[in-house]
Amino acid sequence: MTVKTKAYIALAIVCVFWGTTYLALRVGVEHFPPFLFSGIRQFSAGVLLFAAMAVFGKLEKLSFRDIRRQALPGILLITLGNGIIGWAEMYIPSGLAALIVCIMPIYIVIFNLISGKEQKRFNFKTIAGFVLGCVGIVLIFKDNLGDLGKPEYLWGVLASFAACFFWAIGSIYIKSNTFTTSAYSNAAIQFTSGGIGCFVFSLIFDDFTKLDSITPESLWALLYLTLVGSLLAYMSYLYAIEHLPIVVVSTYAYVNPVIAILLGVAILNEKITWITVLALATTLYGVYLINSGYRTAPLKTKSLEGE
């Protein structure tokens, strides 16, 4: 099996399992302070990964520079990305949070164009795919215009857009730098640093009275997100982003909402209308256009992405 094949398998894992994490996160933060929830999840994943590396003899000596270089994406991706999404899901449906994350590829394209380091020109198919992704978000908001008048709902929406922005910045940082440490060490440092960042945010933003009403469902969600959402899916994401163009990897953000919305409807009874279905169809077709257009776009200059 080639490295690129493994990378696409890793991307498939990200697409499927990260789609389920929006539901698990929504269940978890319903009765658990959100930043504390994310902090425990990510810090535990980091400790477990360090422990596994020690058991299998993969633990390597890390310098302060190594730790600092991985702590930054840990804060961007995990604290400011995943942690803020967890907070936002106290106020907005899990499917809507996943749909907002659809704009992450748009951020990446804009950043690449501004930097002037785009490796491939974006042809009509690629541009049309991104436009369709934006149209999908507009369609889903059509069903929620009235809710935007609620302060908590509006803050949840704005926080989700901000989290998506920070995730895009962190992804570009990882792709545009070369690290001497292993992917396992990188992930472990990112988990622990991101988890610590969530603990700091927890002291500022969390309502600890919710600790009196923690349910078994929240604890099961915490366990699932630690083992599957963090260890399995996040490490798959790091592998995919290392071996595939970042624009291709970022299309997972179009697949996740499909899974998140369907699970939200089936398990949490979140509403779905014909407009939601149209939004789903639009984003799926956008995935096809982005991938098809990117594969056929001509080479231009050296990119942040690599091959």
Image (tube, rainbow, N blue to C red):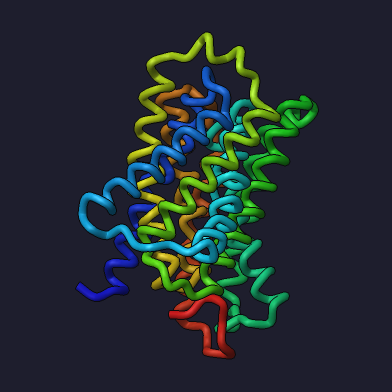
Please name the residue shown 65% across and 55% down the image.
134
**Which quadrant holds the N terminus?**
bottom left
- Side (left or right) of 12 relative to 34: left
**Which quadrant holds the C terminus?**
bottom left
Q: Quadrant of residue 158?
A: top right
Percent x, y for residue 138? 68, 47
Of 194 and 2, the residue lying toward us: 194
Please name the residue shown 47% across and 25% down the image.
27
Please name the residue shown 39% across and 59% down the image.
185
Percent x, y for residue 231? 36, 47
Please name the residue shown 35% across and 33% down the image.
224
Toward the top, the furthest residue is 212
Percent x, y for residue 245? 47, 73
Of 96 and 285, the residue lying toward us: 96
Q: How many marks?
A: 0
In the figure, 41 relative to 237: above or below? above
Q: Is residue 189 visible?
A: yes
Q: Is residue 275 visible?
A: no
Q: Quadrant of residue 239?
A: bottom left
Percent x, y for residue 204? 70, 30
In the figure, 213 relative to 285: above or below? above
